[in-house]
Amino acid sequence: MAIVLSLILSSSPLFALKEAWSPDHVSIGQRAEYVLEFQEGEIISPDFPLKGIHSDPDSPDLPLLEVISVNVEKNKIKLIVIYYATGKFTLPVVWKDANSKEYRSKMILTVLSSLSEKDQMPEDILPPLEFSGPYGWKLAALFAALASILLGVLYAWYLHQTKAHRPVDALLQTDPWIHRILIYENGLDELINSPPINTREFYRTLSGYIRENMARKLNTSFAHLTEAELFSKIYDSFPIDGEEARTWENLLRKSQYSGDDINISREDAVQAWDYWKEVLSE
């Protein structure tokens, strides 16, 4: 009996191989490290995703994951990846043992939305600002924009008091989304007029602008939706065809969660914002 047990243990890779995700729960766009450890010569013909972006099998025009780096050693394979969709995933890693028996990775990585249910205000959705360099100036400009909004509200109050004798919060009570939309509009205006325009920051702000306008028109929160869920609602509610919706979904998902630090031209940014102003005005 001991001999049989010994043979079973020595022939099964499950007792020697070790798989792990670190961390095993991430948000969309957050890096996760996959490690497969084994004894030298224990596995043959390992097959794993190469560095680069890999499409979603169910939607080939959309990115599912991006392999940031691959490190192969004599007893370890390590990949750093980013997922661009929510759900539970196993990395497509395949290997064979000395007897040519094939095995597949079974370690699960859970990918959560980068927006939680508690994200009710645009301030919670926008990426954090740094307090040095150009970001320090952008922060100062943002405070100036908010101050101008406050002055505008006070001026509106003055006009209402002197002309219509109506309280200043009447408009906000009938349309509670205006404040949120104004924050995003000012954010987009500030980005467009302060080149260079970071692509990730611009499209995150544009995504928030789209969400709040959708929320205003349909009177429900869209802060917790993924890009796929958001564009499904847009396709159902606005005059945009399916191909355009998929193209924009792909662009927003890739631009917001890609690790590339690139800029968008002012002309392209203005064109994108004007496009969504027109769509959302229907």
Image (spheres, rainbow, N blue to C red):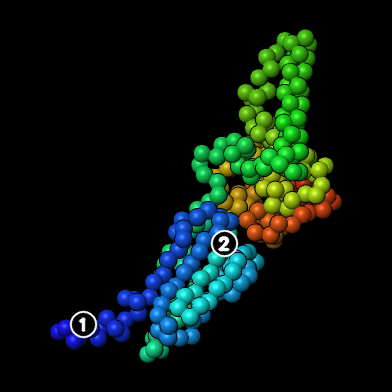
In the depicted structure, whether residue 99 falls above or below residue 240? below
Figure quadrant of the C terminus: top right
The residue wearing badge 1 is 5
Label 1 crowd bin: few (<14), some (14–19), many (20+), radius 10 Å: few
Q: Which residue type carries mark 1?
A: Leu
What mark, if any, has residue 272 been given in the picture? none
In this rendering, position of residue 33 left or right of residue 19: right
Q: Position of residue 43 (x, y in %)?
A: 43, 83
Q: Is residue 205 visible?
A: yes
Q: Measure the alpha-carbon separation of dots 2 and 1.
A: 41 Å
Q: Nearer the viewer, residue 112 or 135?
A: 135
Local SS, label 1: helix
In this rendering, position of residue 192 left or right of residue 220: right
In this rendering, position of residue 214 left or right of residue 277: left
Question: Which of the 4 image quadrants contains residue 130?
Answer: top right
Q: Position of residue 169 (x, y in %)?
A: 66, 19
Q: Nearer the viewer, residue 178 or 9?
A: 9
In this rendering, position of residue 133 left or right of residue 123: right
Q: Name the residue at the bottom extreme.
A: 99
Q: Position of residue 96 (x, y in %)?
A: 43, 84
The residue wearing badge 2 is 82
Local SS, label 2: strand
Q: Position of residue 264 (x, y in %)?
A: 78, 54
Q: Which residue type carries mark 2?
A: Ile
Label 2 crowd bin: few (<14), some (14–19), many (20+), radius 10 Å: many
Q: Name the residue at the left extreme.
A: 1
